[in-house]
Amino acid sequence: MAENKAPEAEKPEKAVKGKVKMIILLVVIVILAVGLSVAGTLWFLGNRGADTGEEAAASEPEFVPSQYLVLEKSLTTTVPAQDRQRYAQIYVALEARDAEALSAAELHMPLLRSRLISTISNSDFARLRTPEGRGELVNDMLAAVNQALEAEGSPPVEAVLLRNFVLQ
């Protein structure tokens, strides 16, 4: 009986070894298939990306960060209201990507301050109390600054930023 049990004991071990080999072989095949698909995808995308990358670099301008000119003194003026005279105190900064525009703005600062104060004093107090009114004021201020800079032959600024806005 001992002889009969020995061959039966070897059969399950051979079956287990065969199953382990089969599992390892399947895992290796799956890994190879995934690796080849990733490599093929990267190769196709890499070829297409190299062609469009050169074209994109030629057609797109390089990124230029914004620069700012901060007006340290506030723009303080009276603002007409229905019931009485009101005051506005506004701190602003000018934004541009062109350094020449900011140096021109700094050179013509007395003219720009005068235009900005005039724009603020022509605004309605009730309208300035709303976010839409402040947005319109910023647009009017930008137009006034760029008109003054254009009259002087200088490049325009991109934005007028409100740093502090007080109505009284």
Image (cartoon, rainbow, N blue to C red):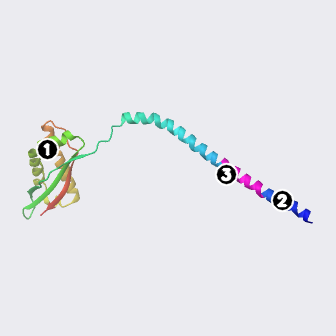
Mark 3 or mark 2, which has the lower sequence index? Answer: 2
Assign a secondary structure to mark 1: helix
Mark 3 or mark 1, which has the lower sequence index? Answer: 3
Q: Residue at x 80, y 59 (%)?
A: 13
Q: Is residue 21 left or right of residue 95?
A: right
The picture places residue 105, in percent across and down from the top left corner, at 15, 43
Q: Quadrant of the C terminus?
A: bottom left
Assign a secondary structure to mark 3: helix
In magenta segment, residue 149:
no
Q: Amino acid at mark 1?
A: Glu
Assign a secondary structure to mark 2: helix
Real-space Cα separation, disc 3 to disc 2, in angstroms: 26 Å
The picture places residue 84, in percent across and down from the top left corner, at 7, 64
The disc at residue 10 is 2
The disc at residue 27 is 3
Q: Residue at x 13, y 55 (%)?
A: 123
Q: Nearer the viewer, residue 76 or 83?
A: 76
Real-space Cα separation, disc 3 to disc 1, in angstroms: 70 Å
Q: Name the residue at the front extreme.
A: 2
Q: Name the residue at the bottom extreme.
A: 1
Q: Nearer the viewer, residue 82 or 13?
A: 13
Residue 41 found in image quarter: top right
Query: Most prominent secondary structure in the magenta stretch?
Result: helix
Q: Quadrant of the N terminus?
A: bottom right
Q: Which residues are magenta?
A: 16-29
Q: Which residue is mark 1?
A: 106
The picture places residue 32, in percent across and down from the top left corner, at 63, 45
